[in-house]
Image: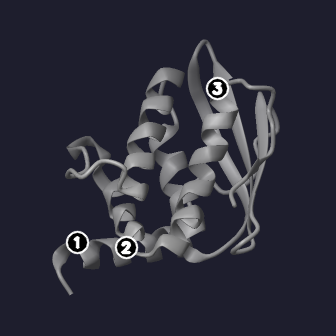
């Protein structure tokens, strides 16, 4: 197992076993429900946006290790980000997960880069991207539509 695969395994296992920002935010300004019917992943994303900044974010739900870990990593990284920065991060993660662009992940992704290993398993990409699509729907302020990945 090379170093990247080991990092991927450690980060995913840690965030699955000990998800960060797990729970509800009572004063969330946006609440998005998301489901991956292929895998059974379900989550509710709670986002508090104030003056164009994600001041708080959390999630609840159940799913596979990749889905929970991705949600946990995403909430850690996005808390305190501006809405434009959160949307840029969504684009970077979409590229990383889907392999849309054939290049190394941006260095500023830090632990998020561990999720790049998912693209080797196409059936798991939707698991890893579910929370990110919910984030985009929440901060894009498109009326709080539920998210379903198919």
Which residue lies at the image location 48% right of the left edge and 71% below the top edge?
A: 122
**Is residue 74 visible from the viewing direction of this image?**
yes
Between disc 1 and disc 2, the foreground one is 2
Q: Earlier in the sequence, mark 1 or mark 2?
A: 1
Which of 146 and 6 lies nearest the eye of the viewer? 146
Decide: is 9 above or below 70.
below
Regarding mark 3 in the picture, which secondary structure is present there? loop
Crowd around label 3: few <14 · some 14–19 · many ≥20 (10 Å) = some
Regarding mark 2 in the picture, which secondary structure is present there? helix
In the rendered image, residue 138, in percent from the top left (x then y), is placed at 69, 33
What is the quadrant of residue 72 in the picture? bottom right
Between disc 3 and disc 2, the foreground one is 2
Would residue 1 be found to the left or right of residue 31 on screen?
left
**Is residue 28 visible from the viewing direction of this image?**
no
Q: Which residue is mark 2?
A: 120
Image quadrant for the C terminus? bottom right
Q: Which residue is mark 1?
A: 4
- Give yes or no for contact between labels 1 and 2 (Cβ–Cβ under 8 Å): no
In the rendered image, residue 17, in percent from the top left (x then y), is placed at 55, 76
What is the quadrant of residue 65 in the picture? bottom right
CA gap between label 1 and label 2 equals 13 Å
Regarding mark 1 in the picture, which secondary structure is present there? helix
Q: Which residue is mark 3?
A: 140
Which residue lies at the image location 59% right of the left edge and 28% below the top edge?
A: 55
CA gap between label 3 and label 2 equals 29 Å
Q: Earlier in the sequence, mark 1 or mark 3?
A: 1
Would residue 110 be found to the left or right of residue 45 on screen?
left
What is the quadrant of residue 139 in the picture? top right
Which residue lies at the image location 28% right of the left edge and 51% below the top edge?
A: 110
In the rendered image, residue 120, in percent from the top left (x then y), is placed at 37, 73
């Amino acid at each position: 197992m090379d170093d990247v695969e080991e990092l991927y395994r450690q980060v995913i296992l840690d965030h699955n076993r000990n998800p960060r920002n797990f729970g509800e935010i009572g004063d969330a300004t946006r609440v998005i429900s998301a489901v991956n019917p292929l895998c059974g992943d379900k989550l509710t994303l709670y986002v508090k946006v104030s003056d164009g900044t994600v001041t708080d974010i959390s999630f609840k739900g159940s799913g596979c290790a990749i889905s929970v870990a991705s949600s946990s990593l995403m909430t850690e990284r996005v808390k305190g980000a501006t809405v434009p920065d959160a949307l840029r991060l969504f684009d970077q993660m979409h590229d990383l997960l889907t392999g849309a662009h054939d290049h190394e992940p941006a260095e500023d992704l830090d632990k998020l880069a561990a999720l790049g290993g998912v693209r080797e398993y196409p059936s798991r990409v939707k698991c890893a991207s579910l929370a990110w699509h919910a984030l985009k729907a929440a901060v894009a302020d498109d009326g709080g539509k539920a998210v379903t990945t198919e």
